[in-house]
Amino acid sequence: MNAVIPTGAARSIGSILIESGRLSSADADRISEHQQQHGLQFGDAAIALKLLTKEDIDYALAKQFDYAYLNNQDSSLSSQLVAAYKPFSRIGESLRAVRSQLMLRWLNADAAHKVIAVVSAGKGEGRSFIAANLAIVFAQQGQRTLLLDADLRAAPTSGQHSLFKLGKSTGLSGILADRAGLEVALPVPSLPGLTVLPVGAVPPNPQELLGRPEFGQLLGKASQQFDVIVIDTPAGGDFADAEIIAARAGAALVVARKNQSLMPDVALFARRLQAGGVTLVGSVLNDG
């Protein structure tokens, strides 16, 4: 019996794995026979026969349900993007749980609620990591997602530029200086639905740029093109930038790092955000 490879959304797990070179037609036949004899799912039968691994089955299911993620051999993005490389891991599940809470508490509550600022009081607490991976899980859900790097204090090649290994872009600073438009944002080819706007050149006046009406206008234009906008920010304890950004966004997700963040600092920062009219939609304890 020869295995037939269907096309389109109706493709079976076996046909996807054959097409990708992970499974031979002969082995697919063996799995099908074992599946029928023992009343198993195709994946369970394949694993029982030791012809496929759970990783192979996860890959096929992701393809079958149009769920984009990268295999470990793909080095086009940073390995820190866990949602892209290990979406079925514990961290991946936690990120999806955060996504669900954000959808319930903010993004689904009002059609105008599309922007979330990811903030923290101190340095090195994982804002960029959380922002990047959250943007990925939103895109994997089918949301048109913009990840905006607004840390105008960081080097142009750090932050989201480094995580997504982006090419040259005028970036956010260029837009705020009225030298470019939203077209300089860069799509991520391996993750359909995700676009990243890197920070661009480091300006001498970050607070003034972020405080200009142009930043709010940019978010307004982006909200017309995207379903979700996730903003990466500088440390809130060092500069007022994060408060300005969060006020423009309207909502913030607060990040703290286990065994590093000082809770009095986090609480003080949260109170300052609330005093500025920012809705705190949740918090993440980063234990990485």
Image (cartoon, rainbow, N blue to C red):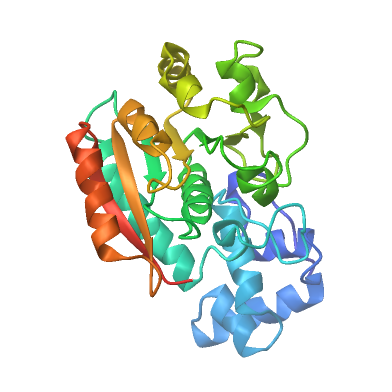
Front residue of this view, candidates 91 and 67? 91
Image location of residue 285, percent across then percent down? 35, 65
Q: Residue at x 71, y 53 (%)?
A: 77
Residue nearest the viewer, comparing 103 with 148: 148
- Image height of 170 relative to 189, above or below: above
Q: Residue at x 61, y 39 (%)?
A: 192
The quarter of the picture where the N terminus appears is bottom right
Query: Which picture quadrant has residue 96?
Result: bottom left
71 with respect to 234 (left or right): right
The residue located at (60%, 77%) in the rendering is: 54
* Up-down relation of residue 101 to residue 202 (above or below): below
Q: Nearer the viewer, residue 51 or 150?
A: 150
Task: Identify which residue, 185 or 207, lies in the foreground.
Answer: 207
The image shows residue 121 at horizontal and vertical percentages of: 36, 52
Instruction: Locate residue 123, reporting x and y percent.
Output: 48, 56
Quarter location, residue 13: bottom right
Horizontally, residue 188 falls left or right of residue 105, namely right
Percent across and percent down for residue 230 are 45, 38
* Side of 53 relative to 1 (left or right): left
Question: At 41% across and 20% down in the image, what residue appears?
Answer: 211
* Figure quadrant of residue 195: top right
